Image (spheres, rainbow, N blue to C red):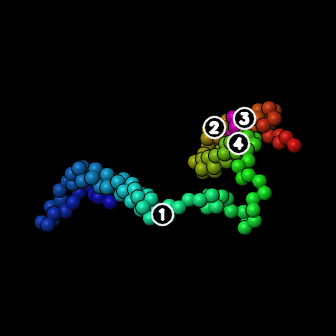
């Protein structure tokens, strides 16, 4: 990392200009972008370009496909996934906050209110039937 002070040959410290820091930050941001552009360009130049129906088909263990692989997905999966992400994030947040509120009654109340709101959301989803899977 660049430091804000730099020693010269005589041992005197001088302030490093902020333009050096800006150029360093631009270089850090531009490096990966340039690398990705080079990789994408090389991929498009070097990849074989002779598509045919056999190469475009899905591979199913060497046997002919029994049905189309493009089946509609039940929307209920999205509901369950959304509920999972919601409560997974709650758990991660509670584990992260727990050491900070140790021994604090106000912190415990804040965590309880947060968990209560999410518990109310779970109860609402349960009452509306979001957790029931139709047969």
Q: Nearer the viewer, residue 107 or 79?
A: 79
Residue furthest to the right in view is: 135
Q: Could you say which disc has been placed on residue 63 in the image?
A: none
Kindly state the secondary structure of the residue where label 4 is placed: helix
Question: Nearer the N terminus, badge 2 or badge 4?
Answer: 4
Quadrant where the image shows the N terminus: bottom left
Residue 51 drawn in magenta: no
Crowding at dot 2, Cα within 10 Å, few <14 / some 14-19 / many 20+, comes out as: few
Q: Residue at x 80, y 32 (%)?
A: 128
Kindly state the secondary structure of the residue where label 2 is placed: helix
Question: Nearer the N terminus, badge 3 or badge 2?
Answer: 2
Q: Could you say which disc has been placed on residue 47 in the image?
A: 1
Residue 117 drawn in magenta: yes
Quadrant where the image shows the C terminus: top right
Residue 105 in percent (x, y) is at: 64, 40
Q: Nearer the viewer, mark 4 or mark 1?
A: 1
Question: What residue is disc 2 on?
Answer: 110
Question: Nearer the N terminus, badge 4 or badge 1?
Answer: 1
Question: What residue is disc 4 on?
Answer: 78
Residue 11 in percent (x, y) is at: 15, 65
Q: Is residue 20 left or right of 107 when viewed as pictured?
A: left
Q: Are marks 1 and 2 in contact (CB under 8 Å)?
A: no
């Amino acid at each position: 990392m660049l430091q804000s002070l730099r020693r010269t040959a005589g041992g005197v410290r001088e302030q490093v200009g902020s333009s050096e820091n800006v150029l360093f930050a631009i270089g850090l941001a531009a490096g990966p972008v340039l690398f990705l552009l080079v990789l994408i360009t090389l991929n498009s130049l070097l990849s074989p370009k002779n598509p045919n129906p056999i190469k475009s088909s899905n591979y199913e263990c060497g046997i002919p496909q029994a049905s189309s692989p493009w089946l509609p997905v039940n929307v209920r999966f999205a509901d369950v996934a959304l509920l999972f992400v919601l409560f997974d994030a709650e758990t991660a947040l509670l584990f992260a906050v727990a050491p900070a509120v140790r021994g604090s009654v106000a912190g415990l109340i804040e965590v309880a209110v947060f968990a209560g709101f999410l518990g109310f959301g779970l109860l609402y989803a349960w009452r509306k039937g979001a957790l029931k899977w139709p047969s």
